Image (cartoon, grey):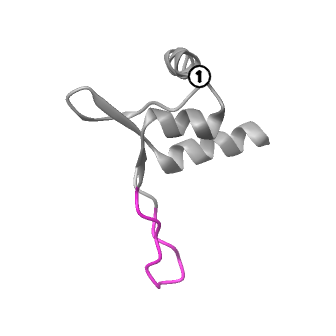
Amino acid sequence: MPEAPDTDGVGTEKPIRFIRIKEVQYRTGLGRATIYRWMAQGRFPKPIRLGGHAVAWVEAELESWLAGRIS
């Protein structure tokens, strides 16, 4: 999901960045099996398909999920 542009009119919106499973594991401290199990339970953001078998997570969605875990 693209982020809305900033309201200051300067056009400083953050570009969409995709991250792969290794970085997701590093940032969350979770193992691959836990990530996929939580996704199936609706407790973790789902990745998008890049093509073939390749998938990646939207960085902003992961950051939002992490912020929710802190609060």
Query: Residue 40: image x %, image y %?
Result: 49, 15
Residue visible at 50% across and 19% down in the picture: 36
| Left or right of residue 42: residue 58 | left
Query: Residue 3: image x %, image y %?
Result: 45, 59
Residue visible at 40% across and 55% down in the picture: 2
Residue that mark 1 sits on:
31
Quadrant in which residue 15 is drawn: bottom left
Quadrant in which residue 48 is drawn: top left
Circle 1 — which element?
A: loop
**Residue 32 highlighted magenta (yes or no):** no
| Left or right of residue 65: residue 14 | left
Q: Main secondary structure of the magenta part?
A: loop
Residue visible at 47% across and 66% down in the picture: 14
Query: Residue 68: image x %, image y %?
Result: 70, 41
**Residue 10 highlighted magenta (yes or no):** yes
| Left or right of residue 10: residue 65 | right
Q: Which residues are magenta?
A: 4-16
Q: Quadrant of the C terminus?
A: top right
- Residue type at mark 1 is Gly
Residue visible at 66% across and 41% down in the picture: 66
Q: Nearer the viewer, residue 24 or 59?
A: 24
